[in-house]
Amino acid sequence: MVEKRGRKGATDLAVVHLDPNTGRPQPPEDMREREAEIWRTTVDAMARGWFNRETWPMLRAYCKHVDAGERFGERYTALLDEGPPRGGGGVALYWEAVDKLGDRYERETRLMTHLASKLRIAKMQRQSGYKDEVELRNATKKRMWEEDPA
């Protein structure tokens, strides 16, 4: 998302309210219903205070890409289930439409996973391999000449 240079006007500042009961950010009021649902699900899945004010625009973009990806995915699946038209006419147009929808679905999915990793909401982003490496390095190793204590 490209930001405008200079001072921000009143319309540029999106207002996101915190829920008084949980302290979690509520979706902006101008979001579509499905995007707001994705926002709530994502925010509720993470620890309290995970999403600070500076991450809200990125979270909003993530919700939009998840919604768009779902829509393109449904249309792509329906088109594949429908299959090419019977007879000779329109087969090339069918496969062209399949390619376009597939490309759009792939683009939305790629953007969604990119934003998920930037927001650190993807499971792989939250796990650290460092701890496992340290545990392996510091684990006691049995030498060939040592017997089992059993």
Image (cartoon, rainbow, N blue to C red):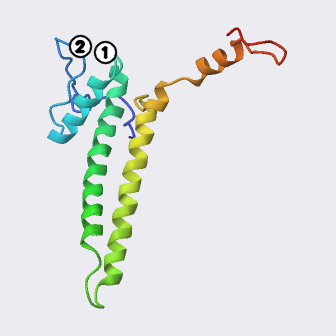
Q: Residue at x 28, y 74 (%)?
A: 83
Cα–Cα gap, marks 2 and 1: 7 Å
Which residue is identified by label 1? 48
Secondary-structure class at tag 1: loop
Which residue is identified by label 2? 23
Residue farthest to the front? 150
- The quadrant where residue 114 appears: top left
Residue farthest to the top? 149
Of mark 2 and mark 1, the one earlier in the sequence is 2
Q: Residue at x 67, y 10 (%)?
A: 150
> Count of labels shown?
2
Q: Which amino acid type corresponds to the residue marked 2 in the rendered image?
A: Gly
**Residue 75 at x, y = what percent?**
25, 61
**Residue 30 at x, y = what percent?**
16, 36
- The quadrant where residue 38 appears: top left
Q: Which amino acid type corresponds to the residue marked 1 in the rendered image?
A: Arg
Query: In the displayed structure, would residue 77 be above or below residue 45?
Result: below
Towards the viewer: 45 or 138: 138
**Residue 62 at x, y = what percent?**
33, 38
Quarter of the image containing the N terminus?
Answer: top left
Q: Residue at x 45, y 34 (%)?
A: 117
Towards the viewer: 140 or 5: 140
- 2 and 1 marks in contact (CB < 8 Å): yes
Mark 2 neighbour density, 10 Å: few (under 14) some (14–19) many (20 or more): few
Query: In the displayed structure, would residue 74 be above or below residue 128?
Result: below
Q: Residue at x 23, y 13 (%)?
A: 23
Residue farthest to the bottom? 88
